């Protein structure tokens, strides 16, 4: 017998009935209210701050909240449990808003359309007493006349078969899907429907999901939608989600439901907007990191997290849509691009596919900084890859006023010589916080103006913006009156250290890959930057901070969302599927976490831009 | 708002709550009370007689019930609808009891075991940081070392894969199934389970279902169970069930559920009795007529019934058990033997397989008389087949006191010269009615003793057993006092005409097949009689009546239940699968219903034994 209470969320004005003792976070998830969380409801990140307006919930003591916040009545949604009817205000900074999402890339286009699905129209002879073979044999005979042999129609398609054949006088259209080299019938429709052939390409990002509706007859992207991966409510990074999947009851099903729900929601929007029924879509390709792929398919991710970091599978078999929960034609297929290892997944394979670096002579380096950081070095003959725990510093985590690239996030910063701040926010609203590209800008500008030294310490130079805070020195980049959150926005020396660790990890990974192949940065002929973060990055400033290598800006190429682009390439051209498999077959993976060289590379990079200034000639003047 | 009432059935003492207005028949189906029905609840067969003991149900007027029965208060369960709480007595003759079921046949045994499922035990190297390929790749590598390549593990098996591999220290057993030439993984278990391999062979009869549990390592039939096909409550013959499937709401799902439920029930008994879990069984083969196969798989049977009699499919694809509802290991497969046409189904293919006639030089005729009648003529070079509507006369229908071969059915009859009757009942109980073999005996004896002429008319010879009844002359074969139903049991001239039509149809089909191939009966080198009916048949008496051809009794071979035997052969030896497909490919089907010769053959056979006595030399003396 558990008593029920009502929880109301403001400003959305959503209500939900839950059991007494439910956490505010769980109630919010059930009510469809998005509250930010990075730690997955473990009381560690302090992002899910809420205010109680009515009711007397019980709250666990926490040392994450600062005294000032406690005084204002802030509580953590994950550590507060309802006891009676409760009204909650979700403050601006705890809300997940719309954010900038890199939707697609136009790096590589398909030369020749050879999609994973195709249609065949056949006209059959009606049966007679003299020609009374079964409906299925009749179809097979009709197809053999068109030299399509060994057609296998599965049982579910036979259920309505007899009526479909007769509805338009024995004229039917078959849809075939290429499911790993085996051509399989996925639909049988009355009449001629060959002028209509659609597929879905998906990027299953840890934070964001992007879905494209693709016309498979023209290769055109008809429409695109994106949204948060609903899993963000269960934790920001893959490790937190793996913990949730393995340690919470129904953890894995909940995570699977969240991502499948996100994709279905987006497909629904696209279908409706383009006048299609879900059943008219017969194939979906998806690229995600290895953990996302596991969670999407309901595979146990437990071993990804623990030494020696083993996924269940990197080459995922083709799966009927109905077995995945994806609401397209249930007989159709879903294919997840293959990954190389637990931390170099199908999204990186997609990146590579979309750059075409696996087919070129030139030596290329690919950097994908998302919630995680992956780097790939190579050309048509060889490839090496590595993954580093970039940490959430560029995605709103580990930085006091850091937020994701959502509406109200500062994405561009310049400083005047006397450290006055000019900034630009996403959506041109008052700022709620600062996102990754804004942080790079801010730190580079502080560095360029001598207000921050190479060790990441702030240098008081008389500006009132540099002051002593609770955690040492801090720089005020927006005064409270100009913000949406009524607080001075600061970057602290602790924040700066966190950002430094992130950039050091990415750079060290690049450096180590080159050294392992006995190459130098100046031998690079092409440098691809992928991922949502990459597209808004100021290369020059990134180089000043030592995040990106100091090579000629001409060789930089931003590929945008390579994951969705790679997915789409496979959808449109089945030969890309073989290329994808070949990429993971030939690519070497270097496990950095146990590589003794990596620690040296990492510590050498724990300066702005680096201990070895010869690596960063452009930045030399800033330091000396 | 529909009111609920309680219906109680005696003597079983089962109660059920149903909506007011529900028919007694529907209530009985819901309550799990078996009431006999041949017409499928259409008020036509008069088999579902019941007595109302309490309550005031509304009953539709019927002319099926005789005045005597109406006077005694009998009503039809299908035409009587409850209005209030009701108590029903199901009289003895309306109850379906245990009956004689031909369980298996030992005609052909498998020379070499090559079952459709096999197991492989593998020991894998545990992963390390240096050898950190995915679980799936590790398994594939382990299998390749055993020269098992291109293994495809489907998504559902990957869900628990990671734990299964680790549970017994990377020692696992894989179960492979041959699903139409493609070897597919259907199970992955921790440890070594190779000493345990089981399959299920099924005969899906229109009336009766037989299930065998087979040890696939030895080829032995470990156990066997049989029961009514629960579909009998929806009608006796295939045409009635097709009507039910196509015209009633949820007709097809109900029929599918009934047969799947029957098979699952029997598998459950077998598994329990033999200490197996359902998940230890990985393959089921089934043979049924084309309608049964359609209903079992949920395929629309509508076109089977109407000119030009087209099934959805004769060659049914392999289906995962979970897609059929069959409760064995869900990843395992179910395979239904292929049929030739709408009226020569997989059961006949199984018969042929079990006789081996498709591999022999000798000219053979196969006769399978069940609820339907099928005949096949041929040898290793050619085969022709036909089907005739045998009608239910031998299965309890169209004959006043006819019942199925259940407990209490008279199965053997002899008459003394003064027409005294000696009989034997199934279960040695007082008789409830007479089944097919008993009717053959009875009519042959009457014929032999001159009490019935070649036209099927009874010849009064002073015996008080021959008397005038409501439908003309009748012969009393058991007096009321000796029966379980307190009525004189009679065979009427109308009954005799019905039996004559049935035997004429079967014989005409045989005759026509021979003529179509320009052969004569005396050229037959082997005559196989299959089906439950066949095994209890007295050949000599059947010849006297003109049911079976008058050939040397040495060439007769009763094969019993060829359907389950053929199923088992395929299960044990995958090469039999190819033989089965080859049989249906090479066998010609002759549609008798539109064959002008058939009507002549049929009318010529509408005498005992036949108009052409030269065909029945043994019977000549009886007629002359």
Image: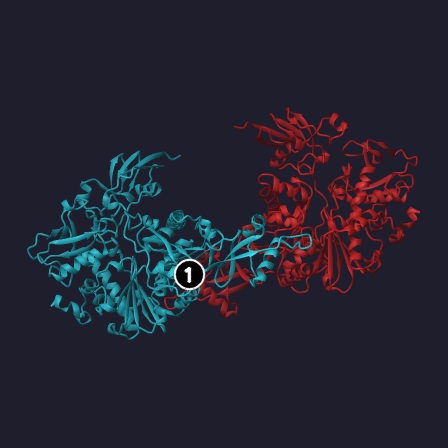
Chain colours: A red, B cyan
Q: Is residue A432 above or below residue A577?
A: above
Q: Is residue B245 left or right of residue A161?
A: left
Position of residue A89 relative to residue B324, above or below, is above
Q: Is residue B228 visible?
A: no
Residue A328, position as x, y percentages in the image: 57, 51
Q: Residue at x 34, y 49 (%)?
A: B230
Closer to the camera, A164 or A180?
A180
- Circle 1 residue: B572
**Mark 1 surroundings within 10 Å by alpha-carbon count, few (fewer than 14), some (14 through 19), many (20 or more):** many
Spot occupied by residue A245 in the image (x, y as percentages of width and height): 61, 42
The image position of residue B241, as x and y in percent, is 34, 53
* Circle 1 chain: B
Which residue is more in the foreground, A186 or B477?
B477
When the figure is inspected, residue B443 is found, relative to residue B11, above or below; the finding is: below
Q: Quadrant of residue B311?
A: bottom left
Q: Tell me where residue A540 appears, x and y as whole percent.
A: 85, 50
Question: Horizontal placement of B128 versus A537: left or right?
Answer: left
């Amino acid at each position: 017998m558990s008593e029920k209470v009502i929880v109301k969320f403001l400003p959305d004005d959503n209500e939900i009935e839950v059991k007494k003792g439910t956490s505010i976070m769980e109630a919010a998830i059930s009510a469809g209210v998005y509250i930010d969380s990075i730690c997955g409801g473990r009381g560690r990140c302090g992002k899910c701050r809420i205010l109680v307006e009515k009711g007397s919930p019980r709250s666990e003591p926490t040392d994450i909240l600062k005294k000032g916040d406690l005084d204002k009545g802030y509580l953590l949604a994950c550590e507060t449990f309802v006891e009676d009817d409760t009204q909650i205000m979700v403050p601006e900074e705890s809300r997940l808003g719309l954010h900038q999402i890199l939707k697609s890339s136009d790096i590589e286009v398909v030369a020749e359309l050879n999609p994973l699905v195709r249609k065949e129209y056949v006209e059959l002879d009606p049966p007679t007493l003299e020609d009374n073979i079964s409906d299925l044999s009749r179809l097979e005979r009709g197809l053999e006349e068109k030299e399509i042999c060994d057609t296998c129609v599965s049982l579910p398609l036979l259920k309505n078969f007899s009526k479909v054949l007769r509805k338009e006088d024995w004229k039917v259209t078959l849809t075939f899907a290429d499911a790993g080299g085996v051509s399989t019938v996925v639909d049988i429709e009355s009449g001629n429907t060959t002028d209509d052939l659609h597929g879905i390409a998906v990027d299953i990002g840890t934070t964001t999901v992007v879905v494209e509706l693709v016309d498979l007859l023209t290769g055109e992207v008809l429409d695109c939608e994106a949204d948060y991966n609903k899993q963000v409510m269960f934790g920001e990074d893959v490790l937190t989600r793996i913990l949730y999947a393995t340690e919470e009851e129904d953890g894995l099903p909940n995570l699977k439901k969240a991502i499948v729900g996100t994709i279905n929601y987006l497909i629904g929007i696209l279908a409706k907007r383009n006048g299609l029924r879900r059943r008219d879509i017969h194939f979906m390709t998806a690229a995600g990191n290895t953990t996302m792929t596991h969670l999407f398919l309901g595979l146990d991710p437990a071993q990804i997290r623990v030494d020696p970091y083993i996924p269940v599978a990197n080459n995922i078999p083709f799966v009927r849509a109905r077995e995945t929960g994806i609401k397209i034609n249930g007989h159709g297929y879903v294919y997840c691009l293959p990954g190389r290892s637990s931390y170099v997944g199908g999204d990186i394979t997609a990146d590579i596919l979309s750059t075409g670096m696996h087919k070129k002579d030139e030596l290329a380096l690919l950097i994908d900084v998302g919630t995680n950081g992956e780097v790939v070095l190579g050309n048509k003959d060889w490839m090496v890859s590595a993954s580093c725990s970039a940490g959430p510093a560029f995605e709103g985590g580990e930085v006091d006023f850091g937020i994701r690239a959502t509406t109200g996030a500062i994405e561009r910063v310049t400083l005047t010589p006397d450290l006055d701040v000019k900034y630009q926010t996403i959506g041109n609203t008052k700022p709620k916080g600062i996102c990754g590209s804004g942080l790079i800008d801010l730190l580079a500008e502080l560095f360029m103006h001598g207000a921050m030294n190479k060790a990441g310490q702030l240098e008081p130079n008389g500006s009132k913006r540099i002051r002593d805070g609770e955690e040492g020195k801090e720089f005020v980049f927006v005064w409270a009156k100009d913000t949406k959150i009524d607080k001075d926005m600061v970057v602290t020396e602790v924040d700066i250290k966190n950002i430094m660790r992130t950039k050091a990890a990415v750079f060290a990974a690049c450096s180590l890959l080159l050294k392992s192949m006995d190459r130098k940065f100046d031998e690079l002929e092409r440098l691809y930057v992928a991922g949502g973060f990459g597209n808004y990055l100021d290369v020059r400033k990134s180089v000043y901070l030592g995040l990106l290598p100091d090579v000629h800006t001409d060789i930089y190429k931003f590929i945008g969302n390579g994951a969705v682009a790679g997915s789409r390439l496979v959808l449109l051209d089945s030969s890309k599927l073989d290329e994808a498999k070949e990429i993971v077959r030939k690519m070497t993976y270097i496990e950095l976490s146990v590589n003794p060289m990596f620690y040296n590379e990492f510590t050498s990079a724990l300066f702005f831009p680096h201990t070895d200034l010869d690596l960063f000639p452009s930045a030399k003047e800033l330091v000396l």
